Amino acid sequence: MEALKLQTVDDLIEADDERVELIDGELVRRPMARFEHGLAQLALSDEVQVFRRAGGPGGWWIVSEISVRYSEHQCPAHDLAGWRKERVPERPSGVMTLPPDWVCEILSPGHERKDTVHHLLLLQRAAVPYYWILSPEDRTLIVYALDGGSYRVCFSVAYRPPETQARARIPPFESIDIDLGYIFGESS
């Protein structure tokens, strides 16, 4: 029986398909983009972009669809990720090799396990301070904060207007109100 050869970041870079990422040494095809996913990703990006601007409430590099190399066999592409400029003062380029300070994954039907189990454990091992999991279909957001080396839920919401508050202060962006209605397509 032949041993399984783990693929590496070099294999990912050489791949013909741009819609793949490296998970546990395997090139995995990313899910087909859906309208709900794109709308939520763009809306959340709109909400947090104020942290990128000069004179804004905080200095962040925030990007979408960014590949992060955690190891030779782990290089996922995150829906949204951010690095504090105090940690990364110069504008980065290429594939990131430094773990982010914040990651948000937007769930896609059939690929939930990757975001809710694999990425959660990978980011926890990499000591990423904040991990958000957003589900446009369920209209939920779960926010994890690193606490003593393990994630704990520090914010969660099932958005159900009118009984759910439309705005919230959510770590690590608690200096502004984030419009949950906008993120979940209510006021877009």
Image (cartoon, helix red, strand yellow):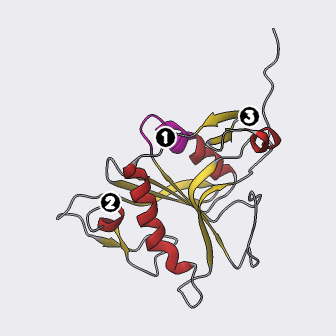
Is 53 rendered above or below residue 137? below
**Range covered by the magenta-colored residues:** 108-117
- Of 162 and 96, the residue lying toward us: 96
Where is mark 3, residue-wise?
25
Residue 186 point in image, percent of width and height: 26, 63
Q: Residue furthest front?
A: 16
Residue 88 point in image, percent of width and height: 74, 74
Where is mark 1, residue-wise?
32
Residue 183 point in image, percent of width and height: 36, 63
- Asked which secondary structure carries label 3, the reply is loop
As measured in the structure, the alpha-carbon distance from the residue carrying label 2 to the one carrying label 3 is: 34 Å
Where is mark 2, residue-wise?
184
Task: Classify residue 8 by image quadrant.
Answer: top right
Q: Main secondary structure of the magenta part?
A: helix
Q: Amino acid at mark 3?
A: Gly
Whether tag 1 and tag 3 are in contact, CB under 8 A, the answer is no
Q: Amino acid at mark 1?
A: Met
- Residue at x-position 55% and y-position 39%: 114
Q: Nearer the viewer, mark 2 or mark 1?
A: 1
